Image (spheres, grey):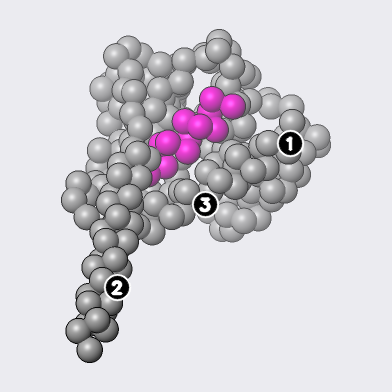
């Protein structure tokens, strides 16, 4: 009987150890995704990557414009370009640059257009493979816009979790002739420093899966 009890205790302790290691790994990996190299000088353009907490990310982009980091804002998810007014207090939509596609000039996303249909339209217009992840498509679009305007310096804004994946893809898309900085929204929910919350876990697993997917198809798409 005592032997069985010892075996049960051993099993419980091993199980608890696995859970603790798993949670510690999640906590460490969650913080890994946060990446920032905030610029100390002006950039040509600020690029906003829209996501679940859209308003917090927009607020960060507007804050950077107000602080004088750039006069231009590009929202790749909408294919819309804006220019700041005096003191950065207002943003005015400006004509989208002529970017070469396989057909007619690409139109910005309408407020009624589904995200899936929009990205499908963009992939078809530029002949991007259907398996390209949306963030990859947005970064490719961003480079086309920057090249059309002759911009070489940019600040990419998104959620804290999104920044590492953006950095990985950006390094593949942009060459050494560009100066791309990354800054996560300071207004979005912060990653916990202790045990990961359910929110942290969900975002961690999502980012890991998307990064793995990017590396998988990128390896065979050369």
Compared with residue 12, is residue 143 higher up or lower down, i.e. above or below? above
One can see residue 121 in this view? no
Q: Nearer the viewer, residue 64 or 96?
A: 64
Q: Residue furthest bottom?
A: 1
Q: CA distance from mark 1 to mark 3?
A: 18 Å
Q: Nearer the viewer, residue 55 or 137?
A: 137
Q: Using residue 177 as the reference point, say whether residue 192 is left or right of it.
A: left
SS for tag 3? helix
SS for tag 1? loop
Please say whether residue 161 is one of the residues in the magenta stretch. Answer: yes
For image coordinates 69% across by 48% down, the residue present is 131
Q: Earlier in the sequence, mark 1 or mark 3?
A: 3
Q: Quadrant of the C terminus?
A: top right
Q: Residues within 10 Å of mark 1 (few under 14, many from 20)?
A: few
* Magenta span: 159-172
Tell me residue 73's x, y (percent).
Answer: 44, 29
Compared with residue 174, is residue 125 higher up or lower down, i.e. above or below? below
Q: Nearer the viewer, residue 153 or 27?
A: 27
Q: Which residue is mark 1?
A: 221
Q: Which residue is mark 3?
A: 209
Report the label total. 3
Q: Which residue is mark 2?
A: 11
Q: CA distance from mark 2 to mark 1?
A: 46 Å
For image coordinates 67% across by 42% down, the residue present is 217
Q: CA distance from mark 3 to mark 2?
A: 31 Å
């Amino acid at each position: 009987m005592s032997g069985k009890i010892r075996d049960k205790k051993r099993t419980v302790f091993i199980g608890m150890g696995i859970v603790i290691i798993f949670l510690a790994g999640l906590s460490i990996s969650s913080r890994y995704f946060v990446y920032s190299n905030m610029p100390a000088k002006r950039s040509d353009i600020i690029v906003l990557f829209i996501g679940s907490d859209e308003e917090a990310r927009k607020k960060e982009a507007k804050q950077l414009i107000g602080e004088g980091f750039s006069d231009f804002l590009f929202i790749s998810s909408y294919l819309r370009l804006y220019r700041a007014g005096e003191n950065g207090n207002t943003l005015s939509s400006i004509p989208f640059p002529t970017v070469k596609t396989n057909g007619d000039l690409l139109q910005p996303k309408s407020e009624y257009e589904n995200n899936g249909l929009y990205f499908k339209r963009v992939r078809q217009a530029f002949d991007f493979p259907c398996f390209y992840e949306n963030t990859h498509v947005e970064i490719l679009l961003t480079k086309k816009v920057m090249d059309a305007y002759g911009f070489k310096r940019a600040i990419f804004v998104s959620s804290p979790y999104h920044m590492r994946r953006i950095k990985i893809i950006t390094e593949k898309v942009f060459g050494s002739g560009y100066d791309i900085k990354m800054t996560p929204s300071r207004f979005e929910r912060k990653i916990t420093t202790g045990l990961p919350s359910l929110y942290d876990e969900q975002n961690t697993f999502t980012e890991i899966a998307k990064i793995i997917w990017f590396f998988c198809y990128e390896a065979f798409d050369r």
